[in-house]
Image (cartoon, rainbow, N blue to C red):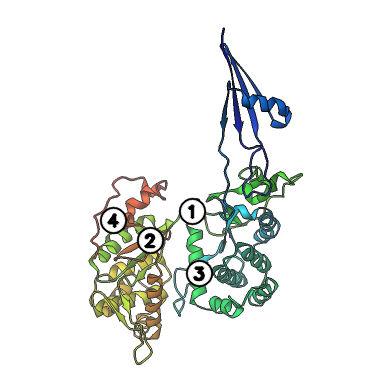
Amino acid sequence: MKTKSLFLLFVGVSILQLTSSKPQQQSIWIIQQQSGDSDVVEDFSPEDLPKSFLFNLLKSPSVKIKKEVTRCYRDDVPNISVKLYYEALCPGCIHFLTSELSPTYQKLGKYLNLELFPYGNTRTEAALDSEGNYVFNCQHGKDECLNDLYQACLLNKIKDQKLQLDLVNCLMGSRDAKKNTEECMKISSVGPKPSFNEIEQCANGQEGNRLMYKLGIATASLKPPHEYTPWLTINDGHSADAEDSLDSFLCSGLLKEAPECKQQITSLKSSPVKKCYREDAPLTSVSIEPYYEALCGGCIEFITQQLLPAYMQLGKYLKVQLYPYGNTEVSKNLDPYGMHVFACQHGILECVNNLFQACLFNKVADTKLQVELASCLMGSEDPHMKTEQCMKKFKVSNVSFEDIDRCANGEEGNKLMYNLSVATSSLSPPHQYAPWVNIDGKHSPDAENDLKSFLCAGTLKGVPECQTKNHGSPMIQVL
């Protein structure tokens, strides 16, 4: 006589806890009766079975029970990354924030880790202004730049995500960002830390300028590059479906078991979001930031033998920002004339060379010309004469040598060098040597050793200019 056995499988738990931070599935009990060579399997919900049957079944020695572990999820850690890249006066961005993101966050906010990037289709100019600040060109004009800037300062000083979203919603579309920031802070009861004065000082100073630059780096580092705003990523992957209907996207996918999603009766699909497309071609691009000094042997080799030839071949894909400062140190005390005092690793002539380069880069906007001038000046111990020669060699016409000389010998150049010191000291992780090269905002020793091969094996591997073989170049000497 063949034996019979029963297997009882508990799947999930039997109670749906609506107050849990994570949805719990309703249980299904699978009773499997084995008899001979055949299996008879039936699925039941526990509510469908008589209690007496279950009680007797559980007591039976022929029943084997397998039960999945019950989990208690954390309430304090949102698990879905949502990043929005937008701009303050883009109609599609305004609509998305007010009609999609805000109501979705009110409903599902405890599951979301929200990050806001108010930069969008803004362009960062290659040349700094006369005070050494970055210059931004916003798609919808200066009012948009100022609004983005005030938002950047608010987002930097206020860490509560719901409050961030409330303030951004309040500011979107405003053409008087200063006035409306103060009003929005009052409406949301923000203060005394930060105060409106703190936000205004940030927006009017170097702090805000650096925040906007970092937003530009973050936006330029998107893979694939953004084509329009609003541009939304979910868990770091772009999602056009989420841009059209964020609530529906989350509730039909990642959060379909969430109690908040199960409670909704119907989900109306929104009309497709209106987009503000980029005015510049969204080519594959790479941001390169070399932090270097003029008389360092490794820096000379990197600029002349790696950066220059790589730029000549791949320049249309590269966004290069040069920082001629390296291992220089700045004194905490000013000199008797109120000027910052610098001590360069390779002596005073290196300081002067770095200074002339800083003035050139501030006055000459063309990136290709900047790289050529840097390559020409590297290693020179007579930067005054060499600068004039290099300007003639590369036919610099938009600024005279006399203007560059005045910059290098005056307060303007001193401020430029100080700004370079701030940028270099702000590196994370801190630089350990020169040349120190960041690619798309992240340090890359591989790029320092072989820039072109690094680019052609990575982000630019599909471009025609990288299809030729033998990308290698000599290893650099790091000093």
Gap between marks 1 and 4, in whole Å?
25 Å
Amino acid at the residue labelled 4:
Asn
Q: Nearer the viewer, residue 87 or 370?
A: 87
Res 305 → quadrant? bottom left
Residue 423, compared with residue 28, is above or below; it is below
Res 422 → quadrant? bottom left
Residue 285, compared with residue 39, is above or below; it is below
Counting residues from the N terminus, which is met first, the one under dot 2 or under dot 4? 2
> Which residue is tagged 4?
449
Q: Furthest-top residue in view?
A: 1
Check residue 211 in the rendering and tell me which mark sits there, or answer none. Answer: 3
Gap between marks 3 and 4, in whole Å?
30 Å
Counting residues from the N terminus, which is met first, the one under dot 1 or under dot 3? 3
Give the image location of residue 220, x and y in percent: 49, 59
Asked which secondary structure carries label 2, the reply is strand
Gap between marks 2 and 4, in whole Å?
12 Å
Q: Nearer the viewer, residue 253 or 299?
A: 253
Asked which secondary structure carries label 3, the reply is helix
Amino acid at the residue labelled 2:
Asn
Amino acid at the residue labelled 1:
Leu
- Which tag is nearer the camera, tag 3 or tag 4? 3
> Which residue is tagged 2?
438
Amino acid at the residue labelled 3:
Leu
Asked which secondary structure carries label 4, the reply is helix
Residue 2 visible in image = yes
Counting residues from the N terminus, which is met first, the one under dot 3 or under dot 4? 3
Give the image location of residue 453, x and y in percent: 32, 51
Q: Nearer the viewer, residue 343 or 278?
A: 343
> Which residue is tagged 1?
283
